[in-house]
Image: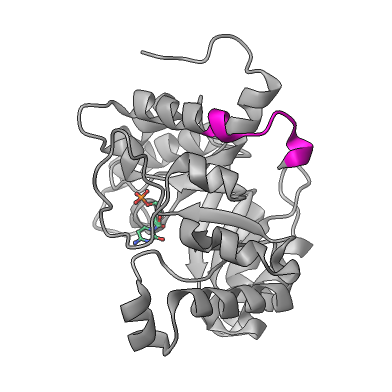
Amino acid sequence: MPVLEGVPTTKEARAIEKLIFALDIDDLKTAEQLVADVLPYAGYVKIGYEFMYLMNELSFPHVDDETAHLKLTNFRNLMKILSGKIFWDAKLSDIPNQVKQAMEIIARYGVRMVTVHANSSVESLRAVVEAAHAGRNGNNHSVRVLAVTLLTSINDQTSYRDFNRSAKAQVMQMATNAVLAGADGVFCSGEELEFLSQFPEFRNLDKVVTGVRPATYYATYDDHHRVIEPQKAIRAGAKHLVVGRPIRRATGTPPAKAAYLIHQEILKALPESDSAE
Ligand code: C5P
């Protein structure tokens, strides 16, 4: 099994910081194993709906008390391992007061990044940004807010149907909302990286990319329509790559190796110095 030997070099550490592993899992045991396998290569772990609802389930009475206590301890241990590395993919979307109150609680978790749907209005987005930036997590960082522009399952055709404009035009409008609300970054696909970088107003936004598909060992796009290879995404200016299934489910490639291979691709694409990023 490939492993990073010893303390990572500065460049390896920069590559690790780029990778966000999507823990889209509904089973605690598998999650623990995946975290152990992948964490050497990933700076962050994205926790999404499945895992959040799995944790919430322990509050409901259909789970007996003993099981709930036992599992809660295991969840807490996992959260301790992930301390300082959690990307809370809340995809908030509601009226400003609701999302503000949710964000005030999330800020107490000590997570590093959180998502909000950019199409839930500039006012809602701003309410999240203000609550996130007012809260300070354990490392004295505020939570970085990423605005979801357009899910990568949407293509031009469905974007016209749902939003009456192309995917790029929708991403641009949502990125504009993100800037107006003071968000730290956007969630977008690799196809929009170069497009967004043409506009100076988006230069300071962190571009976090989903729909990442390594061509060499992972053949399927799953439900994504807008995809990019890891090296291309890094070269086009992605701040982070979110990768889930190509690590968890690469046929014939165990998760630790799949994560290692993506780490290698990121390394190849990184400039020697971080000032060039
Ligand atoms: O496909 P993969 O498992 O790498 O997806 C990683 C993340 O990308 C998911 O956790 C989800 O939040 C996001 N995603 C998306 N559009 C899709 C599918 C997934 O933005 N069509």
| x and y percentages locating residue 76 in the rendered image | 48, 39
Image quadrant assignment for residue 83: top right
Name the residue at the bottom extreme.
164
Question: For the point 32% across and 79% down, which residue is it?
Answer: 158
Residue at (79, 39) in percent of width and height: 275
Q: Residue at x 53, y 73 (%)?
A: 171
Q: Residue at x 65, y 77 (%)?
A: 176
Q: Is residue 175 visible?
A: yes
At which x and y percent is residue 84?
A: 63, 39
Q: Considering only vertical position in the picture, is 204 above or below 229? A: below
Residue 160 part of the magenta segment: no
Quadrant in which ligand 1 is drawn? bottom left
Magenta-drawn stretch, dominant element (helix, strand or loop): helix
Span colored in magenta: 266-276
Location of residue 105 by image quarter: bottom right
Q: Is residue 11 left or right of residue 253?
A: right
> In the picture, which quadrant includes the N terminus?
top left
Q: Is residue 179 left or right of residue 216?
A: right
Question: Which residue is nearer to you in this view: 101 or 273?
Answer: 273
Residue 189 spot, x, y in % from top left: 47, 60
Q: Nearer the viewer, residue 87 or 172?
A: 172
